[in-house]
Amino acid sequence: MLIVQKYGGTSVGGLDRIESVAKRVAKTKFKGNSVVVVVSAMSGETNKLTEYARHFSKNPSKREMDILLSSGERVTASLLAIALQEMGVGAIAMTGRQAGIQTNSAHTYARIESINTDAMKRELDEGNIIIVAGFQGINKEDRVTTLGRGGSDLSAVAIAAALGADACEIYSDVDGVYTTDPRVEPRAKKLDFISYEEMLELSSLGAKVLQSRSVELAKKMGVKIVAKSSFSDNEGTIISEESDEMEEVLVSGIALDKNQARVSLREVSDRPGVAAEIFTMLAKEQINVDMIIQNASTDGTTNLGFTVPQSEMEHVERVIGQFGEDIGSVDFDENICKVSVVGVGMKSHSGVAASAFSALADANINIQMISTSEIKVSVIVDEKFGELAVRVLHEIYQLDK
Amino acid sequence: MLIVQKYGGTSVGGLDRIESVAKRVAKTKFKGNSVVVVVSAMSGETNKLTEYARHFSKNPSKREMDILLSSGERVTASLLAIALQEMGVGAIAMTGRQAGIQTNSAHTYARIESINTDAMKRELDEGNIIIVAGFQGINKEDRVTTLGRGGSDLSAVAIAAALGADACEIYSDVDGVYTTDPRVEPRAKKLDFISYEEMLELSSLGAKVLQSRSVELAKKMGVKIVAKSSFSDNEGTIISEESDEMEEVLVSGIALDKNQARVSLREVSDRPGVAAEIFTMLAKEQINVDMIIQNASTDGTTNLGFTVPQSEMEHVERVIGQFGEDIGSVDFDENICKVSVVGVGMKSHSGVAASAFSALADANINIQMISTSEIKVSVIVDEKFGELAVRVLHEIYQLDK
């Protein structure tokens, strides 16, 4: 089998950790597999380098940030290769460029455009383990690019797709995907399987195990992901196409997202197209608007509510400011959170939304906004009720069973 | 003017130091010059990474060491570029590869084979300052290489030669080349000028200001070097072709090298060719043999003495071991040092060797070995007399005047 393994920052957070990763990689090789490993920078390293840059500039050039930040992964890749060689295992470190990872030119959040696998295939044919510095590539102008936070996941999935790997194992300090955050609900259970779609909903909703871009890519390319811990030998969670088996499960998990803010626009001119203009402008500014509610009012104006990431609040204020008299007033509320029930089973079972709403009502939790998709029901509630809402929903869908 | 500046590890040893280097670079630019800057890793960084590697292996793969070690210079280069941009000065960071530095494949001690200056010229034409990560290049197999200790000096001189720069300023924490080590002789004086040849003798003899490979390259390519301190505004020392003016000075400096060991081979078979075989073998093993003395003895054998760097002692022992019965016994003596008098004036003035020997004799310092070149007289003396010998010679050639 050809296996791609990716080790995150805490998994390679120190020399002893790198040693233990080397053993794990060697073991995979000794079982007769071909192995490509993608590594992140040692934990804390990327933040340290970012702070260095911020010492000089609040808004450092992205082109230079990419040369700066890509250095951390190179250190880990070469150290891991050296550790493996010392065990007598053939290994070679490769930078993103050497691994053939070609990206577009969007520095600090580049997209992988293609992977030239020639060099990797040559090394695999010679029986070597390849250690690729994650998170980085090279653009057409021959400059180093990075793929954004969590970009090493993306490197791993893209390499797995390009090489036609049998699995892409993503190692971190958690041993898989849980029915909800165990810090919120200690009875949360690790899932054996989850579909790409569910994982996407969960990761974009704040259940951070995998970067969502990498799940999207895995889905598109049909790469089977296994999320595992590098600190234990527990079986992880397999993320793959949904199967009949999965659809029998109504709800897979409950996600809690505290990073949302609610924007309330009051006395918006009721002339046609104002709402469209507002959301077009927000989209143009790449502000990720989530739920939207519109209430017609009685006095010829409208109230509009929507949620955005808290980090975008200032940005939203600037955009809304351009509408002048068309908008009466703007309010921001950070004291909210989003609780989501996710499950592919919803596609074929109705009534999940209803049972969720009534369970929350029974617990006296007021629902401020609602949004639903084919496999998800999300509600906005007061931030202080977030954890309670998660536990209530975890309970009624019997996720601890 | 087109000026190449190189800043060493202590000059970029912290964020405040990088800030101050940025100001110096900007000032050079504001005077109307085109500027290319070559930077080392922050001081301590390369050692830290080397220790990391040695945690895993006593003899880590050189190919992987090159990816590892080249990361330090990339960090400094991008930070300096960011600092300059923040001052409103156009600057771009380049890795060795981006700067077009092509080397041979000798990992960790690669030689620069050519520099494709297209990318640098394009940026200079646009008025940008270029910050190049020193010490690194790329080989024909597209892999990162490094140039060995002090390799950033070499990057700077090679870039200055390739671009036809008017000067190559090498910044460190000392403000130039001195008549001798000021820690040994406080009356040592900074030289205004020194020839390449003298600098070569001094640097290979332990007066560490410039890496000798870079001085050799500067000599070959006619690059004017200025050795300066980044911690002061003092004029530095100009290293260039020798001029008539230089030749009027009999002696330029006195160097002390404590890193030599003397190897004494006793009872070497007196058959023809044995000495040649020994030194051929040592040369093949790239052991740098310095002085050689041969004494014919009375009993049909010979005694052979020579000096090598102390770090090569084990290596020498292994090589000598191969000669079996042809060599009676081997002795190593680390308690020696080499004191050298250097000056292009010697070419046209005789008697320097004689005056040096008699001055040392007057001070009761016994000379164990002697070697001379056109512009140098070196003697091996007991290590404990090294500093005294330096002061005696500094005095008789009136170098403090």
Image (cartoon, coloured by chain):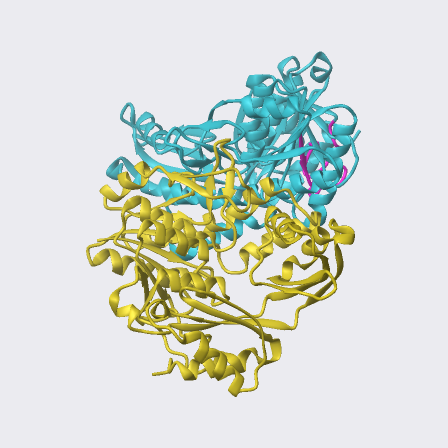
Chain colours: A cyan, B yellow
All told, the count of numbered labels is 0
Look at the image and give the residue range highlighted in magenta: A169-191
Asked if residue B269 is positioned above or below residue B175 in the image, the reply reads above
Point out residue B2 in the picture as x, y percentages from the top left corner: 25, 51
- Of A53 and A32, nearer the camera is A32
Image quarter for residue A186? top right
Q: Nearer the viewer, residue B375 or A225?
A: B375
Q: Residue at x 57, y 33 (%)?
A: A211
* Corner quadrant of residue B254: bottom left
On the rendered structure, is B40 left or right of B126?
right
Percent of width and height locating residue B334: 66, 69
Q: Is A181 colored magenta in this rendering?
A: yes
Residue B200 screen position, x and y as percent: 42, 61
Q: Name which residue lies at 52% across and 26% down.
A: A371
Task: Identify the residue at the far left of this view.
Answer: B32
Coordinates of residue B161 in the picture (x, y in percent): 32, 47
- Tell me the quarter of the image containing the C terminus of chain B: bottom left
Instruction: Write down the quadrant of residue B170 in the picture.
Output: bottom left
A126 is higher (above) or lower (below) than B276:
above
Residue B349 in view (yes/no): yes
Along the viewing direction, whichever of B203 and B357 lies nearer the viewer: B357
Left or right of A214 in this view: A56:
left
Majority secondary structure of magenta residues? loop
Q: Is residue A6 magenta?
A: no
Work out whether residue A330 can be spotted. Answer: no
Please name whichever residue, A257 or B257, is drawn nearer the observer in this view of the structure. B257
